[in-house]
Image: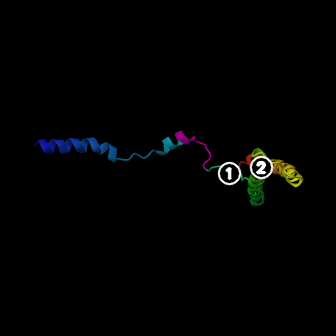
Amino acid sequence: MKSAAVVALSLLIAAPSAVAVAPSPAEAQVLAGSNAARRVAPRRPGLSDRDRERLYAAQDRQIEHETKIAELTAITEAGGVLSEQQTRELAQLQRRLADTVEDIERLEAKNERLGG
């Protein structure tokens, strides 16, 4: 008798959680608005494939320039002196790095404007 009461009680407790309640069409209208748009607005495209490749290439160049600049500055930090050629190369790398960073910033700003 005791086990039958336990089974009945457990079925009574579990029954409401087993039933799924689907919202009525009226609830859906209230939740979405009666004249709400039924489709999602298309996402604006970001950069074109060409611009995206240019951005990735510029980011790769930035890493290369920073690596070479770090190598040359490591020489001076170790107490060494750069030759004239190395000094010219360092100045040239710094200019290239500045140009590359400008390209990256311009392409990233364009990507943000386009919603990418």
Residue 34 falls within the magenta-colored stretch: yes
Q: Earlier in the sequence, mark 2 or mark 1?
A: 1
Taking the spot 23% from the left edge, 43% from the top edge, the residue there is 10
Query: Between residues 87 and 97, which one lies in front from this camera angle?
Result: 87
Taking the spot 14% from the left edge, 44% from the top edge, the residue there is 3
Which image quarter: residue 47?
bottom right
Q: Is residue 87 above or below residue 12?
A: below
Residue 52 falls within the magenta-colored stretch: no
- Most extreme residue toward the left, as rendered? 1
Mark pair 2, 1: CA separation? 50 Å
The prevailing secondary structure element of the residues shown in magenta is loop
Residue 44: x %, y % from top left: 71, 51
The secondary element bearing badge 1 is classed as loop
User: Which region is colored magenta?
Assistant: 30-38
- Most extreme residue toward the front, as rendered? 79
Q: Which mark is residue 43?
A: 1
Residue 97: x %, y % from top left: 81, 50
Q: Residues within 10 Å of mark 2 (few under 14, many from 20)?
A: few
Query: Between residues 102 and 52, which one lies in front from this camera angle?
Result: 102
Residue behind mark 2? 75
Which image quarter: residue 55?
bottom right
